[in-house]
Image (spheres, rainbow, N blue to C red):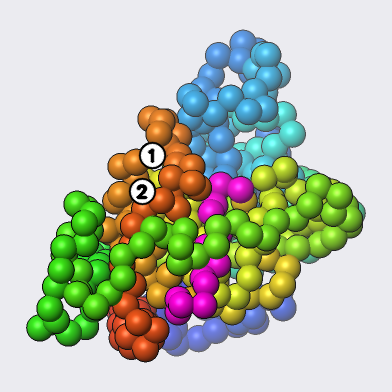
Amino acid sequence: MNIERAASPCHPYPAYKPSGVPWLGDVPAHWEVMRAKYYYRESQEVSASGAEELMSVSHRTGVTPRKDNVTMFLAESNVGYKICRPDDIVINTMWAYMAALGVARQVGIVSPSYGVYRPREPGLLNLEYVDALLRTDGYRTEYNRRSTGITDSRLRLYPEQFLEIPLLRPPLAEQAAIVRYLGHADQLINRYISAKERLIALLEEQRQAVIHRAVTRGLDPNVRLKPSGVEWLGDVPAHWEVRRLKHWVGINEAVLPENTDPYFEFRYLEIGAVGAGTLVSEPVKTRFGNAPSRARRIVRTGDTIVSTVRTYLKATWFAEDVKDDLICSTGFAVFTPRKAVWPNFVGYITQSNALTDRVTAASVGTAYPAIAESRLGAFHVALPPLDEQAAIVEYLDGLRRALTRPSPAPAAR
């Protein structure tokens, strides 16, 4: 959102003027455009005791008290740390290109390498307004342009560069109006997100119930049933065959050998990248020589991977169409379907509550529950003939597409 138009999103201002800054473009005619150095000066105030509250500066949360459980990078003493006060702008000099900055709401201390900028004349800029302004995409791009360094990880936004950046200053009443508008928009969006999350949870619950029914009873509601002989599986269609999972799939059949070329490049799936039936993040490119020792299991098109650690997450994924360079962690079991099995059907079996609940219950350990591949392969599952597997897969694929079809988000008023 362009903050210069946020105060009146539906009705443009009567007159605009060139800002004189290409990336800002035209702005309302009565707004001031002046470099930051006219509003702020660099503060070098430091702590004599180091006893003030230690603050964190993040692109997500701005300037906030550091959490007690974060101990990484803590110094032995905070003496000499820079003091920030309410209304000060604090910038993480090394991560400015990510908009790791914000306006301080309280007295605290920050790293000596951070930039602290104090208002020359308090009251000219609304605290919430300037915090939002400095996080917009245009300003992020400007921080990146003005930062110096060889690579992104070594960029630094020094005071002389920051203080040359132009700031937009509407009258205080309009700054407050912009803040109210953004707050209202945030409330609308957050309500929409909450409602969407509740809907997704309900749809996921419905999807799981349908998958469970389809892979244990089929699509015919009038089919004749028989006891499966497995307590947790219950009755199954009389013409289905009940056998151990390892009879229907090969388990961990392809692995990278220890003598793999260290320069061999592949895409790696860690446990955290897989959710319940889906990828939650893309595979990470790496080389064998740089990869963790658990990056060993080869995943091919038609395989299904199932997490054998932290099994309560129910992390499974069907590799519908993948390249030949996909490797997953040894924290997964890789199922390769045999000839009597439709590959997608295995993927749906592993998403069924009938199996995932059993895997969770049979796992060993409290903090990090896990199950051995041999135990997993010993579970019984029921399979219909191939043509019926294909029909069930087609039905469930259609359901998945219907449930994942995006819906438009409401516009902020």
Q: Is residue 352 on the magenta stretch?
A: no
Say few, some or many: other residues with alpha carbon within 10 Å of mark 1 (under 14 / 14 to 19 / 20 or more): many
Residue 198 seen from this side: no
Q: Secondary structure at mark 2?
A: helix
Residue 212 horizontal/vertical position (percent):
25, 67
Residue flagged by tag 2: what amino acid is it? Val
Q: Nearer the viewer, residue 140 or 242?
A: 242
On the image, which quarter does residue 243 sit in? Answer: bottom left
Q: Position of residue 382 (x, y in %)?
A: 31, 67
**Residue that numbered label 1 is attached to:** 363
Residue at 27 percent of width and 74 percent of height: 240
Relative to 361, say whether 215 is above or below.
below
- Quarter of image, res 285: bottom right
Do labels 1 and 2 touch, CB within 8 Å? yes
Q: Is residue 223 left or right of residue 196?
A: left
Image position, residue 161 (x, y; %): 79, 53
The stretch in magenta equals 330-342
Cα distance between the residues tagged 1 and 2: 6 Å
| Residue sitting nearer the eye, 2 or 170 | 2
| Numbered circle sitting on residue 359 | 2
Give the crowd class for mark 2: few <14, some 14-19, many >=20 residues within 10 Å: many
**Near-viewer residue (345 or 320):** 345
Question: Within the magenta stretch, is there residue 339?
Answer: yes
